[in-house]
Every structure is written in C-alpha cells, then in structure tokens.
Amino acid sequence: MGQTGESDKPGIFQHRAQPFIICRLTTGDPSLPTLGVNIDHVATVRQARRTDEPDPVWAAAEAQLGGASCITFHLREDRRHITDRDVPLLKEVVVCKLNMEMAIAPEIVEIAVRTKPTQCCLVPEKREEVTTEGGLDVVRLADRVSEAVRRLKDAGIVVSAFIEPQAGHIEKSAQLGFDVVELWTGGYAHARTPPEREKALKTLHEGVRTAIQCGLEVHGGHGLTYRNVAPVAAMPGFSEFNIGHSIIARAVFVGLRAAVREMKDLLDRHGAPASA
Ligand code: PXP
C-alpha cells in the first residue's frame, strides 16, 4: 500500500488503518475524530506579495509535527493561494492523509487524477468569494458531479462531498457514489445567538445520522475555532474535522506546530468516538 492512498482498494475505513507514521506517533485514541489542517491560508499570505514565503509545504510539515492526521489544500481554478508548484511537493512531503479540495472543473479533475491524493473533496467555487461559502449543490449539479466522482474513483482516490447538512443532499451524495460527506459547519459557526446555535447543532446532528444511515463516513469543517469546536467535536459520528483559518491565525503568535497541537488536544478532550 502506498503512503498516500495508493492502496489496491481505497475505502472509507482504510485511512484509520493505514500505517501513517505521523498518526501513529500522535493519535491517542483512534476512534476519536482526527484533525485535518487546511494550509491554504499560509499560501494566501505568500501570494499577497507573490513571493516564496511563507511556504505552504513547510506548513504541511509543521502541521504534521503538531499532530495533524490530514493535510488539506484547495487548488482553486484561479490559483489564488495554492499553486501548481505546491501540488507535487505536498504529495511528496505529506506522509499522513492528503486531502485535495477542488471544484468539479475538468482541468482540476485531471490534476487530481495525476496527483492521486488520498482523498478529493469536491467543493463549490466562486471567483468572488473570500473562502468556500456553503456546500456543493450535488442535486442541481448531479450530472457533472457524477462524472468527476467516476474519474476520481477510477484513479483510486477516496471522494468526499462538501455539502450542507440537508437530508436531500446527503442522500444524493450517497447515490452519486461518494465515500465521505464533509458537512458544512458554517451554519453553526456563524450563528449569533444561543437558540440559533442550538438549532444549527440539531441540524448537524440530524445530518450526521442521515449520513451514517446512508453508509457514508462523516467529516466536518468551516468556521471552526478554538472557542466553538467543543460542541461539534462532542457530537458522535464525525471522524474528521478540517480546520484552517483559526489554526493559522493562532500560529502567527504561537507557531504552527503549537497551534495544531492545541486544536488536536481540544479534539482529543471533547471528541466523541465516530462510531458512538
Ligand atoms: N473544509 C472545507 C471544504 C473548506 O472549504 C474550508 C475552507 O477552506 C475548510 C474546511 C476550513 O474552513 P476554515 O478555514 O473556516 O477553518
């Protein structure tokens, strides 16, 4: 089996069992949700000056040393942060799971098929957005999504759908052949009042249950911070959280390795077993 998902039959439960050196060194209880660190934000700082620092590839190494079980990057069509130069280097440097976020654009699908990350997470992409806003509309875009899923799965890549926690979208993701759904946690993260937060948590909880009933592995992400992650981490069923902005923001002050370690400690402290 290859180190980044080049197994004969990649499957949704294989990540945990893969002999990822970093995971074994840093993950205490393998049933707890793991941490994927999104390093795009490091590349955003680099691209602000169109220079060569800070390097997201260095960030990937540091995040792994801090306890990340997954490194997530998003190669956008406009290459606003991660660039083509970064992709093969990340593939080489990342010894834990490598998760490529991407639009369903054929050019990007081609790059993913060539690169063979462990997992591809299909997301919506709009030029005018600051970051990914909301989930992919797998119902409206079913034909195009289905083609991308087929191409990626044929290449042996685990495929995830970044979707909102709505039953229709979760069930459609299962029908389209996704292995994983990453549920958009932005509804919870952006809630302004305790009742709004409670409602969003309930929606997420129902989403997780529906996804598990559909046989999907469940991840979560977007807008999670050191202050708000605990209630979501404590929800049974999530096996991975992908977190970017908050970790990179803290890293400015404490360093990336320490910032990742702090978030990982929170997940270890508050996380519920994925199978509970
Ligand atoms: N998951 C997905 C699919 C995303 O698009 C993003 C944003 O890049 C994240 C997780 C991480 O979100 P944040 O930077 O708000 O932690």
Image (cartoon, rainbow, N blue to C red):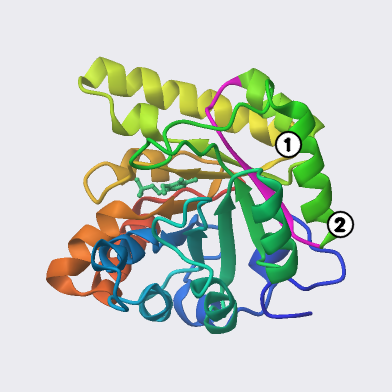
Q: Nearer the viewer, residue 74 or 212?
A: 74
Q: Position of residue 89 (x, y in %)?
A: 53, 80
Q: Nearer the viewer, residue 16 or 166?
A: 166
Residue at 71% in and 48% down: 106
Residue at 53% in and 69% down: 84
Residue at 66% in and 33% down: 211
- CA gap, disc 1 to disc 2? 14 Å
Q: Position of residue 2 (x, y in %)?
A: 74, 80
Q: Is residue 150 above or below residue 57?
A: above
Q: Which residue is mark 1?
A: 145
The count of marks equals 2
Name the kind of residue labelled 1 in the image.
Answer: Val
Q: Is residue 250 above or below residue 181?
A: below
**Residue 167 in which image quadrant:** top right
Q: Nearer the viewer, residue 20 or 122?
A: 122
Quadrant of the image containing the C terminus = top right
Residue 19 horizontal side relative to residue 1, left or right? left
Q: Is residue 161 magenta?
A: yes
Residue extending furthest left? Answer: 253
Using the image, tell me which numbered label, if any, was put on residue 114.
Answer: none
Element on which disc 1 rests: helix
Q: Is residue 95 magenta?
A: no
Element on which disc 2 rests: helix
Disc 1 beta carbon < 8 A from ligand 1? no
Q: Which residue is mark 2?
A: 154
Other residues around mark 2 within 10 Å, as few (<14) / some (14–19) / many (≥20) = few
- Magenta-tinted stretch: 156-166
Q: Position of residue 42 (x, y in %)?
A: 31, 66
Name the kind of residue labelled 2 in the image.
Answer: Asp
Other residues around mark 1 within 10 Å, as few (<14) / some (14–19) / many (≥20) = many
Mark toward the start of the polypeptide (1 vs 2): 1
